[in-house]
Image (cartoon, helix red, strand yellow):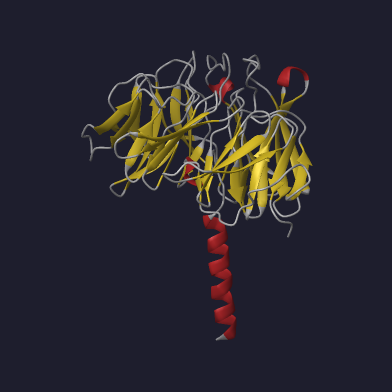
Amino acid sequence: MKPLLSFMILLLLVTSARAEDADQFRGAGGLGVSKETNLPTKWSATENLRWKAALPGKGLSNPVIAGGRVYVTATGAYQQNRQVVLCFDVTTGKKLWERQVWATGTTQCHPKTNMAAPTPVTDGERVYALFATGDLVCYDRDGDLVWYRSLVGDYPTVGNNVGMATSPTIWNENLLICMENAGESFAAGIDKRTGENRWRIERPRGINWVSPIVIQNQGQAEVLFQGPAGIEAHDPNTGKKKWTAPKLRHTAYATFTFGDGVVFSPSEKFTAFRPGKGAAEPEVLWQSIKLRPGYCSPVAHQGLVYVVNGGGVVNCADAKTGEIVWTHRLDGTFTASPMLADGKLFVLNEAGTTTILQASKELKVLAANSIKDTFLATPVASDGAIFLRSDEALYCIGAKK
């Protein structure tokens, strides 16, 4: 009985750890909400710093964490021609490996962004990294190359124009990507073990940095693609189209979110709608012109929606009505999306100040912590810590183990 009991305890611990992995853009599920608790609320460049690791170049991608490893991408060399994937130990920050590929697509972009803008995704066994150059690479957890594709080589008119930041996600055996640009635009389900297309659909041409998200709609998995003409839902296993949201002018930067069966979409009018069943048209619940996020993706949690704009205005709205509950202005410029964890909203500005607000109907500022560096990447939480990625380093904020 003792060996069996030990095995069951170990299995429970492993399952619990995996449930809190931050495995893609904005953490588990891509929604900016973490299950982590007991996170630090005070830190600096020396206080509550578990570890800090230097990075070889800039990047807008947030780190992804699974199986005791932290993966992050960076770009470097002359004119950002080198695309880098790095792996660190989650507990110590020790660099376990670093791999690079040379860009096959153009590297010219707006100075606000760079080639390591898309966030990688991991399933714990492998890490999949897409770069704004159109280079797509898969490594196993030990850094061995599994497969590589030049999407520009496959589709020569694909370009990053002013930049490309859409991040991939995973559903079952499919790596889901959306490549919307001035050239050939498409979404695809790629076999995550071979790198080959399992399905591919045409998408409207135009610059779009929004990442796909997989939701559960009445027990059915659907991958949502947001573009300037609206949101479309497709079967993530086959690519078959299921429904289209009302045609609104949607943002090309901030990614929508999902909670309590409702999609919250940044657009000309911030829109909350409930997906229809089958091919039925979604039901619009409310719209608001007051909730405009800029680059920052919104968060929905426990009946409230939080929206941060580039100038530091934080709005908390009722998720059922769109009515503003409270508004608070922060100092600085904001590009990173907020993270909600442990009943708190973590809002990071570009200068490295993280303001922590109570996630509730009552406005309460809990703390403000500063690390002097340049931060454009979204924070994530895992392993009892907060992970911040700057232009120069990866920071793990938490008590030392």
Please tell me which residue lies in front, 144 or 347.
347
Residue at the image point whose x is 44% and y is 46% from the top:
360
Residue 370: x percent and y percent?
Answer: 70, 37
Q: Residue furthest bottom?
A: 1
Query: What count of labels does the image hold?
Result: 0
Residue 140, visible in the rendered structure: no
Task: Residue 158 in the image: state x and y as whole percent.
Answer: 53, 17
In this picture, residue 194 sits left or right of residue 278: right
| Residue sitting at the far left | 280
x then y, percent, for residue 352: 68, 33
Instruction: Check the image and report above or below for 360 versus 190.
Output: below
Relative depth, front residue between 3 and 92: 92
Q: Quadrant of residue 279?
A: top left
Instruction: Tell me the quadrant of the picture where the C terminus can be found.
Output: bottom right
Residue 244 image point, x, y percent: 29, 28
Q: Nearer the viewer, residue 10 or 155?
A: 10
Q: Quadrant of residue 233?
A: top left
Q: Nearer the viewer, residue 123 or 10?
A: 10
> Which quadrant, please, contains the N terminus?
bottom right
Residue 53 visible, this angle: yes
Q: Residue at x 59, y 57 (%)?
A: 38
